[in-house]
Image (spheres, coloured by chain):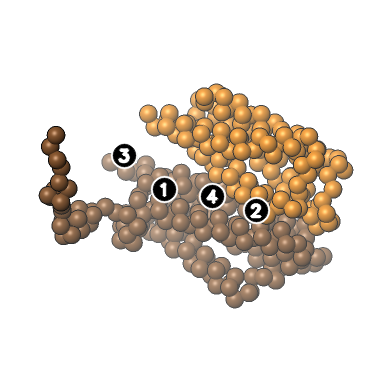
């Protein structure tokens, strides 16, 4: 189960990196106003860095056998906050669900949130034991 | 089969219940105070400074003093305003989480490390947003925002370091 949840997290991270790279590099995504376009670009830039940093730190700590529970805890909290920001606020600004990659990200996001929360709790439990 | 009569069961009196609950340190302000007194003076300073910053932020928000400095004032984008409201709410939830950790004197370091990273995300995205939306030559808002956010981050970092020192000393004893 843990391996499966970790696989979901890796798949989602790959999808997000691909989508945000597309948002930053192509003109396929057209937000409604110029301000909204800047907001989309800014958030995409920050989030792509967060995902890349989170993945790198996680992989490095996992490979070197260090404690992972705090890293996973922080990643989980930030993932939920970004989800709330998108769902409650940014939905009207940056949603671009017509693109297959964006649809894939939206569809897999709830599964990812559940998976990353499960992995974080499980890791905490394993390291406490 | 023997019939049970619940009215005949012995029940604890109110005084007994009060005496049992007395030692459970739930959301009792005395517990926060006790935890703070166990820590160093620097830890206490950081916590009080963070609370004062929060208080002044709330006062600035409700007096309207902060409004002209927010990104939504320059972009007129509803999303910017709503984003600020949401982060404002998350900020209070984080303060609540920190207070609960201090109240129970458990997991203070991991809780504040989590809060630190969330705050760093707010700081970076907020600063980037201001840099991209501010009119030419308008640096006051950016400077004020950056100084306040950096102060919060530094105080939190200091608090984490103090907690780590305290836990290390406790472990040595």
Residue beneath disc 2: A88
Residue beneath disc 3: B172
Residue beneath disc 1: B108
Q: Chain drawn brown, letter?
A: B
Q: CA distance from mark 3 to mark 4?
A: 27 Å
Query: How many marks on residues?
Result: 4
| Residue in the image at 75% along x and 47% along y | A95
Q: Left or right: B47 with respect to B148?
A: left
Label 4 in the same subunit as label 1: yes
For marks 2 and 1, give the one nearer the viewer. Answer: 2
Q: CA distance from mark 3 to mark 2?
A: 47 Å
Label 3 in the same subunit as label 2: no
Badge 1 or badge 3: first in the primary sequence: 1
**Looking at the picture, how far across and down is residue B121, in whole percent?**
62, 49
Q: Is residue A73 above or below residue B157?
A: above
Which element is circle 4 on? helix
**Residue A103 visible in the shown view:** yes
For marks 1 and 3, give the one nearer the viewer. Answer: 1
């Amino acid at each position: 189960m843990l391996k499966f949840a970790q696989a979901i997290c890796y798949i989602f991270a790959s999808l997000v990196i691909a989508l945000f790279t597309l948002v930053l590099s192509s003109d396929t995504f057209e937000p409604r106003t110029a301000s909204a376009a800047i907001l989309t670009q800014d958030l995409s830039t920050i989030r792509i860095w967060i995902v890349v940093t989170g993945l790198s730190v996680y992989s490095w700590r996992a490979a070197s056998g260090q404690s992972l529970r705090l890293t996973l805890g922080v990643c989980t909290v930030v993932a939920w906050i970004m989800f709330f920001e998108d769902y409650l606020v940014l939905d009207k600004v940056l949603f671009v669900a017509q693109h297959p990659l964006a649809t894939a990200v939206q569809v897999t996001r709830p599964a990812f949130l559940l998976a990353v929360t499960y992995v974080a709790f499980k890791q905490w439990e394993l390291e406490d034991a | 089969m023997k019939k049970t009569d619940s009215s005949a069961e012995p029940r604890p009196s109110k005084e007994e219940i009060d005496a049992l609950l007395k030692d459970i340190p739930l959301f009792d302000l005395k517990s926060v105070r006790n935890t703070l007194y166990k820590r160093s003076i620097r830890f206490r300073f950081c916590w009080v400074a963070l609370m004062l910053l929060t208080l002044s932020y709330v006062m600035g928000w409700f007096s309207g003093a902060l409004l002209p400095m927010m990104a939504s004032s320059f972009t007129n984008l509803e999303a910017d305003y709503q984003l600020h409201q949401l982060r404002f709410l998350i900020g209070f939830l984080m303060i609540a989480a920190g207070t609960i950790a201090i109240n129970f004197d458990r997991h203070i370091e991991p809780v504040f490390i989590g809060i630190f990273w969330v705050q760093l995300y707010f700081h970076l995205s907020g600063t980037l947003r201001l840099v991209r939306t501010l009119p030419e030559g308008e640096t006051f808002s950016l400077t004020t925002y950056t100084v306040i956010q950096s102060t919060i981050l530094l105080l939190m970092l200091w608090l984490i370091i103090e907690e780590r020192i305290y836990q290390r000393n406790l472990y040595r004893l």
